[in-house]
Structure formats: structure tokens, C-alpha cells
Amino acid sequence: MKKSDDDQHSHVEETDSHMEGSDSHMEKTGEDDHGQADRNGHDKHAGHGQPDNNGHDKHAGHSPGMFRDKFWISLILTLPVVFWSAHIQTLLGYQAPEFPGSDWIPPVLGTVVFFYGGWVFIQGARQELRNLLPGMMTLISLAITVAFLFSWVVQLELLPAEALWWELATLVTIMLLGHWIEMRSIVQAQDALQELAKLLPDTATRITDEGEEKVAVGELQGGDIVLVHPGESIPADGVVRKGKSDINEAMITGESRPVKKAEGDEVIAGTNNGAGSLHIEVTGTGEDTKLSGIMRLVAEAQKSKSRAQHLADRAAQFLTGAAILAGVLTLIVWQFIGMPIDFTIVRVVTVLVIACPHALGLAVPLVVAISTTMGALNGLLVRDRLGLEEARNLDTVIFDKTGTLTLGEFRVVEMSTANGISEEEALRVASGVESESEHPIAQGIVKTAEDRKIKIPAAEGFRALTGKGVAAAVEGIEYHMGGPALLRAEGAELPSSLHEAAEAAAKHGQAAIYLLRNGTVIAVFAVADAIRQESREAVSALHQRGIRVAMLTGDAQAVADAVAEELGIDTVFAEVLPEDKASKVRELQANGKKVAMVGDGVNDAPALATADIGIAIGAGTDVAVEAGHIVLMRSDPRDIPRIITLSRATYRKMLQNLWWAAGYNIVAIPLAAGALAAWGILLTPAAGAVLMSASTVIVAINAQLLRRAEL
């Protein structure tokens, strides 16, 4: 049992400021009521298309399998329509077999294709018109309906012209193929996210007074103790009560290395246990797990609109209107010239088909789905798409110091020794002396020894020296540890080398703790809030991207300057009260800076909300951080430059897709209308459908290439 010794290091009151806010980063909000998911936290829209302008799903009730089946059946029906088409026979120079009723093969099968394969587009058009947002479905249904009605008028000999049965059938079939490809692309973009839902095992081993029992994961409740064998998945969020193991959290946090877990450590549902057995007390199940929270955030981000999406929406609406206008003008011009009505109708249908804003409808949502899922699989949870999109424009990143750039815990950052004792031996003895102390500085010394894999010796006769420090015997030798008050009480003299080390610690605002043996000082330890190893890489990576780095802290100026100097931070705001952090953000914004604030999402909430982009770091175990645009699963500042890399790569793909999806119509629409007819270049509706579908496929493939981005 550890002894309470609150006053044992009272001689270093001036260092207590190190602890202000150091615990606050551990405070988490337990609420996550902004998400709307089912009871298991799964995405309700799995297998559906992207939301359209009003947020409803233009492919509601559709699936890749449905379009696949309709495509293959329509293709089988279309082949005889094409084969028995008089136009195709003349074009290719062959004679199809004739028998009673053979002339009715194209109209009958063409009609079946229209209703079986084309009805899905007509239903989509009705929905678009009901919402007063005509778009892709409206143009497709208008094209196939015009072709269908015109063909029956010709078939019934009400108009002397050539029917468009083979054009109609091939058009519907190719459009079904295009939608099948689109739906597959969307589902593939969501597949990685949906894999998260499969991480949870179906059953768990619950430990009761009667022994072990296998139960469904859904039956687990808070307070239950579950046994997780080596290699099994963690069935629920919880706390380790017995055992040690390495946990693979890669699918949840993006951390590639296994994380060591021991008694008292938290574990996350869906992560994979290593070689050790664990007894875990359940703290969260079902929709209350971190896994469900992650899926809610990602699902919401995929449905949220960015500026690029709004631009695509407006472009699609404009293109729809332009296509209808182009179709009307095509009809008027060709009839005015005196061309046959069947020729004119073919031109009109081709214009309507080739101008469908299909690629525009897919250009941004598919990139959104892929980038959001990529972020989630790398521990970057996007709560607001606008935040990720704007991250590319950042020129300043502000870090909260405690718990963000630093561990928020004391560690030995420097040490010096005398009388021939090595640093490792001094730390070993010091950790033994302090091993029974509960003081944060004492625990910092012990944890430093543990971090360095030093075996901590047992201490005997531990006792607190009120107002001065502690004393204990290690391996039969009496040692004292404390600060300046201990030196004065013992009348101990500092060797010159140790005196310089103590002065350097004081200059940097660090606590100097002395180790005495038989009244002689043999070592001095500089103890401070330790800088994360990853912080140096993070600051360097931001500088490489042309971004300045600032730091906010409530610590003394000397402490802040020491951290800033070591990390190469450009601007330091020290001795800042929590309520004043937001004003520092506004100060930089007033100078024209595009600012991101990185903090713990709790005591930094005002600053996070004030910044252009708020990034909550280390909130992976409580994903309901409301103040930030982006939530980081792990406390790794290197994820900040990764956000910027993802933002820039995402925006590039959006722009590329938008330019292609909208730009090809500049050439395609005049070509479809017959602008090159004088040179014998005319597109059929089916050829127009191929071009339109090809543009969609190109957009989908280009979006998939985003996966190659190295974050």
C-alpha cells in the first residue's frame, strides 16, 4: 500500500504550476448525443448511394446487386433488339432470320427493357421533381421516355420515320451499367468503414460466481467481467482488472504498433488482444462503445456538405437546365433546317443523355466518402467536412502545451551525478526510494526508470520528511531525496557540477530533486512535464509545409520558452489563463492568419471553437468532443500535418473531378447536338450514353486514386 505524503515535496512549491492543467487533459466528456445511428452504431446508409442536395438518398433502396441484375437481364433482352434492328442490319450488311412476328421483336423487347430496366430512372425523376431539384434522373428518364413514345408512334405508323428501339434498349442497358459501376464505387468507399462494424466478436466469455459462460456480446452490461483469451477481439469497452498483454489498436486508432495494457488501463471494443489473457471490466457496450462513436462521426462527416459539394450541386442544377435548353434548341434548329423528325429526335435524345450530370453527382461525394474513411482508418475523425476542406489553407497551428506537446506527466528530463555513480544507477536507486510515494514528481521519477527498462529495487523503512522530502533504505543503504529545503536541513554542499545542473533546471523552470547518501549529494534530477517524442517531428513536418507553429500554456514564461526552444516553435503565449486562450486565437486571426487550434477538447473548448479549425487531440477514448472540427484518436501531434496532407490531397481530387465532370460537356453537348454533322460525325444515343458513363467511370477511378496518398 502506498503511503500518503502530500507534503513531502513542499519545498518545490514553485514547480506546482507544472501540474496546472496537466490532469485536465484526462477529463473527457462522456456525452455523444449528436450522432444518429442504430442501436449497434452501424451506418444506416450502408449500401446506399450518397445523399443528394436535400440530404435524401437519390439511390434509396438501391444496391449494386440490383443494378447488376437489371443490367444483365436488360443486356440479354437488348441483344435481339439490336440484332433484328433494320438500321443495324443495313449498317453491318447482314439479314436477320425472318419468321411470323419477327418484326415485333424490337418493339416488344424494347418495351420490356424500358419498363424493367428504365423504370428505376423514372422513379428517380419523380423524386427529383417532387423536391423541385431536377437532375441526372430527370434527364435520363426524359431521354428514354421521349425515345419510347416516339418509337411507338412510328411503330403504329402514325409518323413516317424510323423507330429508336435499339437506341432505347442500348441506352437503358448502358445507363444501368454506369449506375452499377457508380454504386460499386460508393460501396467500396464505405467498405473500410463497414469493416469496423465487423471487428466486434459475436460472443464473449463472461466470468460469474459460478465460473465462465459464453454469452452474446449484446448481453454484456456495465460492470461485467469478461475474459479475453490471446488472439481474441475485445468485446466491449472496459478497464483491465487482471493480466498483461499487447493490444493491436490499428483499426481503431491507426497506431501500427501494439499497445501494452496492464491492470487499470482502458481497452477499446473491436481491438485485438495479443499473447496475454486479460480480465476486463465492461464500461461500455452497444452504441456506447468508442467504436460506435467513431462510426457515428464518420457517417455524419460523409453526409455533411463542403464548399466543393455545394459548388457541384449548383453546377449539376445548372447543367440540367442547360441540357434541357440544348435539347429544345436542337429540336428547333434541326426542324427549321428541314431534317427528318426521327433524325431530330435522335439528336435531342443524345443531347439529353450525354449532358446528364452523372459524373458531377459522383465527383465530390465519392471523394468525401474515401477521404473520410481514410481519415478514420488513420485515427483522424472528421466531424465537419468544411474543417477538413479548409485545413489546406492553414498558415498557423496553435498547440496547447500540456497533454498535447507534452505528456502532461512529470519525467526526469536531465540528470547529473557525482562521486563516480552512473546515471542509470542513480536513477535506479532514486526510483526505489520514491516507489512508495504518491507525489506526482516522485511518480515521474519512477515512470522514467520504467520507461528506461530499469528494474526498480525494493525500499525499506519508507517515510516522509515533512516539508523536506522522503527517506528510505535501498539494499541496506539509507538515502534521502528532496529539494533545496532538504539540502538546508541536512547542511549538504553541492559539488560544482551538480550546482550547474541545478541552476540550469531552475533557469528552465524545472524542479531540481537531489539524491543524498550519508548526507552527501550524489545526484540531481531535473523533473518537468516531459515533451512527447513525436512533438519534434510534428513541428518539423509543419514547418516543411510552410506553416508556423505557436504554443499556448498557463505555465511560466521560462518553462514555455524552454519547451519552445527545444521544439523550434515560432510563437509562445505563456501564463495564459484558460478563459484567455480564445483571445490569443483571435489575435492571430486579426493579423490575417488562418489558424488551427490543437487542444484536448475540454478546457480548450473556447479556443477550439474560435479557431478556423478546431482539432481535439487525444480524444480517441471519448469521441464526443463537440468543440472541434476534427477529433484525433491518439495523442500524437504528428497527426496534425497528416490532416493537412489529407486536406490538400482531397481538395485536388475534388477539383480534378469537378473540372472533368463539368468540362467535358463543353465538347460533348455540341457534338451530341450534331455540330459536326456536315463532316459525317454523328453520335447515337447509345454512344452518348457510353461517353457519359465513361466520364462517370473516370471520375470514380480518379477518386479511388486518393487512396494512394501517403499521410
Image (spheres, rainbow, N blue to C red):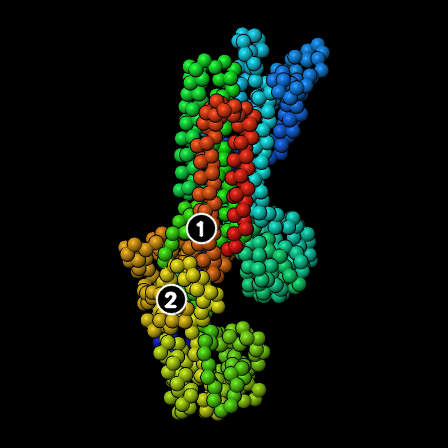
Is residue 51 shown to the viewer in this render?
A: no
Q: CB atoms at circles 2 and 1 under 8 Å apart?
A: no
For this rendering, which residue is in front, 4 or 355?
Answer: 355
The quadrant of the picture occupied by the N terminus is bottom right
Q: Which mark is residue 648?
A: 1
For this rendering, which residue is in front, 438 or 355?
Answer: 355
35 up-or-down from 559: above or below: above
| 2 or 1: mark nearer the eye | 1
Is residue 156 shown to the viewer in this render?
A: yes
Q: Is residue 390 left or right of residue 108?
A: left
Q: Is residue 111 left or right of residue 353?
A: right
> What residue is rendered at 50% in x and 55% in y?
711
Q: Amino acid at mark 2?
A: Ile
Indicate the secondary structure of the residue bearing disc 1.
Answer: helix
Q: Is residue 342 left or right of residue 214?
A: left
For this rendering, which residue is in front, 571 or 470?
Answer: 571
Q: Which mark is residue 298?
A: none
> What residue is rendered at 61% in x and 53% in y?
235
Q: Judge the density around disc 2: few (<14), some (14-19), many (≥20) Cα neighbours within 10 Å.
A: many
205 up-or-down from 120: above or below: below
Q: Say which residue label 2 marks.
A: 569
- When asked about the image quadrant of residue 640, the answer is bottom left
Q: Amino acid at mark 1?
A: Arg
- When asked about the image quadrant of residue 663, the answer is top left
Image coords of residue 322 (percent x, y): 41, 27
Q: Is residue 380 left or right of residue 163?
A: left
Indicate the secondary structure of the residue bearing disc 2.
Answer: loop
Image coords of residue 17 (percent x, y): 37, 71
Which is more N-terminal, label 1 or label 2?
A: 2
Q: Judge the density around disc 1: few (<14), some (14-19), many (≥20) Cα neighbours within 10 Å.
A: some
> What residue is rendered at 64% in x and 50% in y?
201
The span from disc 2 to disc 1 (Cα, nearest Å) is 23 Å
